[in-house]
Amino acid sequence: MARDGGVTWRRTEKIDRFNLSAADTAEELHVLAVDDSLVDRKVIERLLRISSCKVTAVDSGIRALQFLGLDEEKNSNGFNDLKVDLIITDYCMPGMTGYELLKKVKESSVFREIPVVIMSSENVLARIDRCLEEGAEDFIVKPVKLSDVKRIKDYTTREFRVGEEERTRKGINKRKQRDSFDLSSSSPPSILSSSPVSSSSSSPESQSPSPSPPSIPSASSAPSSPSPIDSHSPTRRVKTTSSE
Amino acid sequence: MEVVQIQRRLVDYTKSLFMEGFLDGQFLQLQQLQDESNPDFVVEVVSLFFDDSEKLLNELTIALDQPNVDFKKVDGHVHQLKGSSSSIGAQRVKNVCIAFRNFCEVQNIEGCLTCLQQVKQEYYLVKNKLETLFRLEQQIVASGGSIPMIEMGF
């Protein structure tokens, strides 16, 4: 019910505000940026630093895995020691593509919680779909702007706080059609069975100054069912314009 | 020449580059990322773009000169050039790259060769323009002035 969705949101924001002062000063987000282009690496690094993030920039998926400790040669010791909070990767890279990197991260029990954002110069719906299905947090069409980084940072910070709730909800999105007709099902937690949040509500988390015009239809939901709790519907945030 | 005059020249020159389509909004974005802690950011990124592009243009020339052209390889280089030109706002270069990739896809050698010529032209033009822009900025800074922020209507 819309009310439940609203309550969920308010609760999220309360948690956010409650923890914000403590965590805000504690640590910056550590972002692992992956791009084979030197020019793009320099730009993304600056975009992230200016947004108060710690950045580690690498030029390939392999190096990204090495940095995380996920490559075949070393066994991951089971901890996210380097505390990577977000991975942002280019899609088209020689060797391992961003998509393959995404899969490897999501297959890892240690690292699958880390949100992964894909960047691409090509606005191909099938590609976006594939990435979102594989668990990508968002898909940014290049060239990347400050507003994109601010947006990702916002919901990554919130991910910290809400954690478990978010992950379950994301998992539910793909099965939402079933859930929305089966409210008596005991498997989803009660807050999440409140499926049809009014799709007319504007995205509450949207703090970015430039609203992204969703000129492509929502790629991950069937047309007839109401959109899921929209704050994390990545397709609404897919940019299609590249210049202002 | 007075600082104010050079500043005005810079503003007018920059605006003309946008009007003529050499640069797009992404260039402004880069300028916004420059500050006292990173005063040379734009020059640094653009320099990387110059180095990268010249390498790519060389590779493209060689690749298209082969008896059996490897269009996938050519497309790969153009894709890279398209990406970096887009990232710094070199709009005209990017646009030629788009056409270039279309010719690669249909393996049209003549189209590719024409595009190569065009992209080189556009590249050298924008390189020239940006170097002029940076020189003006240097003059301002050397005279103790500050670089004016460009406000664009669009």
Image: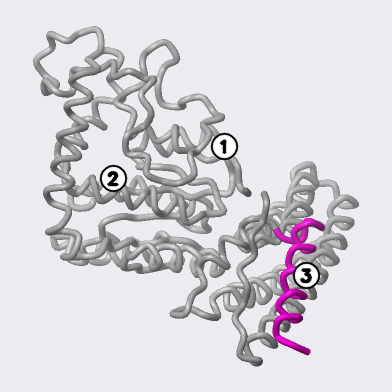
Residue B7 is inside the magenta segment: yes
Asked whether, in this view, residue A39 is left or right of residue A173, the answer is right
Q: Is residue A132 above or below residue B111?
A: above
Nearest to the observer: residue A129 or residue A40: A40
Q: CA distance from mark 1 to mark 3?
A: 36 Å
- Where is residue A7? Give x, y as percent: 17, 26
What chain is tagged by disc 3?
B
Give residue B24's quadrant in the image: bottom right
Image quarter where the N terminus of chain A lies is top left
Q: Residue at x 23, y 66 (%)?
A: A74
Specify whether disc 2 shares its chain with disc 1. yes
- Where is residue A220? Give x, y as percent: 41, 26
Q: Residue at x 20, y 8 (%)?
A: A182
Q: CA distance from mark 3 to mark 2?
A: 49 Å
Which kind of residue does numbered mark 1 sit on? Val
Which kind of residue does numbered mark 3 sit on? Tyr
Q: CA distance from mark 2 to mark 1?
A: 22 Å
Q: Which residue is mark 3?
A: B13
Among all residues in the image, which is located at the extreme left? Answer: A186
Query: Which structural element holds mark 3?
Result: helix
Residue A228 is inside the magenta segment: no
Q: Which residue is mark 1?
A: A124
Q: Is residue A69 above or below residue B154?
A: below
What chain is tagged by disc 1?
A
Which kind of residue does numbered mark 2 sit on? Lys
Q: Residue at x 43, y 67 (%)?
A: A45
The nearer-to-camera label among 3 and 2 is 3
Q: Range of the magenta residues?
A: B1-23
What label sits on residue A106 in the rendered view? Answer: 2
The nearer-to-camera label among 2 and 1 is 1
- Where is residue B87? Give x, y as percent: 60, 60
Nearest to the observer: residue B93 or residue B115: B93
